[in-house]
């Protein structure tokens, strides 16, 4: 009888009653086929691999992570709360020592959900990994956390949330944003003034196969992780790099995904994208489960692997070899010696960023001004003024989890002034230091 080398908790939530539409790529079948595959292969008969039910994330779990306008209930359905709760359950299994590793096979996905949320973009409403990470830090104390996002689409939401956080390393390997949604994730995107070099992006050319992705893992991701020395490694495990995925242009196989997972060796994996519902996801997820459990995955092969039309796609162009090798060398230098950001504007003791964000799923356009207090003692209080075609002018204030007394006082001053002077439809406070989460509407 097989026994897992690493005890593994698998959390399953296919959200069988939720879909964007009956024919949309983000629909129930995404995980129903995987669920059948794992059961048919007898995965849960293996000693040490156990299925667990998800939790339901509560309002506070979302409010300590996001500014939701007008409120949490308006942007997240019950299925979103359970999907986020599945990620929280995955964290609890590992942090309490019940399992060595965990894999949250949940949907809807979340890595395109940014700090401010007005609706759905990139099929995402709330950020499952970020909600999980903030649960970890609030429940289990300070942690250095590394996120390795291997979804084919750039994890722009996760990047936005941790842009100014020096204790969270965000690495995204994705198809070049010049060729795919969301059009971001370039090497020069390196993080905010107090977290420069803690955001790292590797935009890979269309057609990159197992060879290129695994080269990047071994020659860039692993050296960075070794230097950063995280307490936890999280794999944002999107599977739309697969060679059969209908909305992307990469050439990764199920075994390639398993080897990737084996190399990164995450404590927790959380499912993101992946839309080859029958021909890829069941096999990729099976391979990842086996890899996380420390078991042999060499026998896993998707049905299309032997088809002539796909065999050609799996051979990576030699020009991609050279491109990936050069990119890894350059990004490794940048990580160890990040250049100063000369594009930053500063006003009244705050760094200022103006952003325009489009919610493609819901058709919402948002304008945003983000201000970060220039503080030498902590990451600095963050103030975001936002308005969109769905929500009038609103304000979010975040006091960081390790705020100094000056930033704590400044955060409350801005929060109180906004209520007294008016001009905002909603004002939300996230005080991570004192676990104080408030929202007022006018």
Image (tube, grey):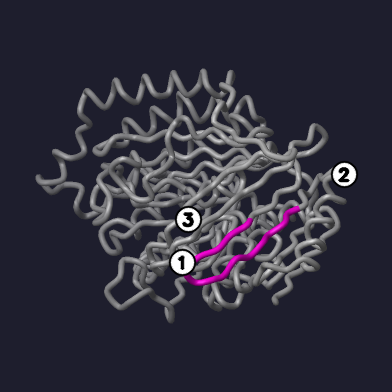
Which residue position holds label 1?
Answer: 120
Q: Position of residue 173 (x, y in %)?
A: 42, 38
213 horizontally vs 105: left or right: left
Q: Residue at x 23, y 52 (%)?
A: 244
Q: For the residues labelled 3 and 1, say whether their Cβ atoms are less than 8 Å apart.
A: no
Q: Mark 1 vs mark 2: which is more N-terminal?
A: 1
**Image: 411 above or below 265:** below
The magenta segment: 385-398
Tell me how far mark 3 sits from mark 2, CA to CA: 32 Å
Q: Mark 3 vs mark 2: which is more N-terminal?
A: 3
Which residue position holds label 2?
Answer: 406
Q: Position of residue 229 (x, y in %)?
A: 67, 31
Q: Position of residue 28 (x, y in %)?
A: 38, 74
- Residue farthest left in this picture: 308
Q: Residue at x 19, y 33 (%)?
A: 315
Q: Residue 20 falls in which quadrant of the image? A: bottom left
Q: Quarter of the image containing the C terminus? A: bottom right
Q: Residue at x 62, y 36 (%)?
A: 192
82 horizontally vs 380: left or right: left
Q: Position of residue 377 (x, y in %)?
A: 83, 34
Q: Nearer the viewer, residue 274 or 204?
A: 204
Which element type, helix, strand or loop, lies under badge 2?
Answer: helix
Q: Residue 61 falls in which quadrant of the image? A: bottom right
Labelled disc at residue 112: 3
């Amino acid at each position: 009888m097989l026994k897992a080398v690493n005890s593994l908790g698998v959390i399953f939530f296919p959200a069988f009653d939720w879909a964007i539409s009956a024919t949309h790529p983000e629909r129930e079948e995404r995980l129903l086929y995987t669920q059948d595959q794992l059961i048919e292969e007898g995965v849960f008969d293996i000693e040490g691999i156990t299925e667990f039910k998800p939790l339901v994330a509560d309002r506070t779990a979302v409010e300590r992570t996001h500014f939701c306008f007008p409120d949490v209930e308006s942007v997240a359905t019950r299925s979103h709360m359970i999907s986020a709760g599945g990620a929280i359950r995955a964290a609890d299994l590992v942090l309490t020592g019940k399992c060595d590793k965990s894999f949250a096979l949940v949907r809807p996905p979340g890595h395109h959900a940014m700090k401010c949320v007005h609706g759905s973009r990139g099929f995402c409403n709330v950020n499952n990994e970020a909600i999980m990470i903030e649960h970890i830090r609030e429940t289990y104390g300070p942690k250095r956390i590394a996120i390795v996002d291997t979804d084919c689409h750039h994890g722009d939401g996760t990047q936005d949330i941790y842009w100014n956080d020096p204790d969270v390393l965000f690495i995204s390997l994705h198809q070049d944003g010049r060729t795919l949604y969301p059009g971001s994730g370039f090497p020069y995107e390196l993080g905010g003034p107090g977290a420069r070099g803690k955001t790292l992006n590797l935009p890979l050319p269309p057609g990159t196969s197992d060879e290129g992705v695994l080269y990047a893992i071994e020659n860039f991701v692993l050296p960075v992780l070794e230097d950063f020395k995280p307490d936890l490694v999280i794999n944002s495990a999107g599977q739309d790099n697969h060679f059969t995925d209908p909305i992307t242009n990469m050439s990764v196989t199920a075994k390639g995904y398993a080897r990737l997972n084996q190399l990164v060796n995450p404590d927790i994996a959380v499912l993101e994208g992946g839309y080859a519902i029958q021909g890829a996801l069941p096999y990729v997820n099976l391979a990842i489960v086996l890899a996380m459990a420390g078991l042999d995955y060499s026998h896993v092969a998707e049905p299309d692997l032997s088809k002539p039309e796909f065999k050609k796609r799996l051979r990576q162009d030699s020009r991609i070899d050279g491109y990936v090798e050069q990119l890894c060398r350059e990004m490794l230098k940048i990580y160890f010696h990040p250049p100063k950001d000369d594009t930053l504007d500063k006003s009244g003791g705050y760094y200022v960023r103006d952003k325009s964000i489009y919610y493609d799923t819901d058709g919402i356009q948002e304008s945003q001004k983000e201000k970060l207090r220039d503080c030498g003692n902590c990451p600095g209080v963050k103030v975001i003024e936002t308005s969109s075609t769905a929500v009038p002018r609103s304000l979010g204030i975040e006091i960081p989890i390790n705020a100094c007394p000056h930033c704590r006082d400044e955060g409350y001053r801005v929060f109180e002034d906004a209520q007294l002077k008016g001009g905002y439809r909603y004002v939300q406070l996230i005080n991570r230091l004192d676990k104080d989460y408030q929202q007022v509407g006018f």
